[in-house]
């Protein structure tokens, strides 16, 4: 953690940021598709539950 001192004696602490990871084109698409399908299934289940209650 980097700490600097301002005029007047106040201290400022800056967090260390993690390194950025650059993804190649095409990486991570299967994870996005899986998340989309899971969300769609969840929405359909919620609609079915709401329909069965009413």
Image: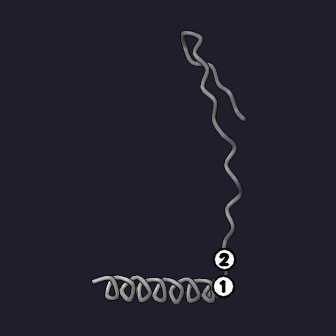
Q: Are marks 2 and 1 in contact (CB under 8 Å)?
A: yes
Residue 6: horizontal and vertical position, in percent? 57, 18
Q: Report helix, strand or loop for mark 2.
A: loop
Look at the image and tell me in which quarter the C terminus lies: bottom left
Residue 5: horizontal and vertical position, in percent? 62, 19
Q: Which residue is mark 1?
A: 27
- How many numbered markers are drawn? 2
| Apparent side of residue 17 relative to residue 8 in the rendered image (left or right) | right
Look at the image and tell me in which quarter the N terminus lies: top right
Checking the image for residue 23, the label placed there is: 2
The crowding category of the residue bearing disc 1, from other C-alpha atoms within 10 Å (few below 14, some 14 to 19, many at least 20), is few
Residue 45: horizontal and vertical position, in percent? 44, 87
Checking the image for residue 53, the label placed there is: none
Residue sitting at the far top: 8
Q: In the depicted view, which residue is nearer to us: 38 or 6?
A: 38
Q: CA distance from mark 2 to mark 1?
A: 6 Å
Q: In the depicted view, which residue is nearer to us: 12 or 37?
A: 37
Q: Residue at x 38, y 89 (%)?
A: 48
| Apparent side of residue 36 relative to residue 18 in the rendered image (left or right) | left
Depicted 17 relative to depicted 46: above or below: above
Q: Report helix, strand or loop for mark 1.
A: loop
In this picture the colour scheme is: one colour
The crowding category of the residue bearing disc 2, from other C-alpha atoms within 10 Å (few below 14, some 14 to 19, many at least 20), is few
On the image, which quarter does residue 34 sit in? bottom right
Q: Residue at x 66, y 39 (%)?
A: 15
């Amino acid at each position: 953690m980097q700490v600097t001192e301002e005029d007047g004696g106040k201290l400022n602490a800056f967090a260390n940021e993690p390194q950025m990871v650059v993804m190649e084109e095409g990486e991570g698409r299967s994870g996005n598709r899986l998340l989309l399908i899971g969300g769609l299934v969840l929405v359909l289940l919620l609609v079915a539950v709401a329909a069965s209650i009413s």
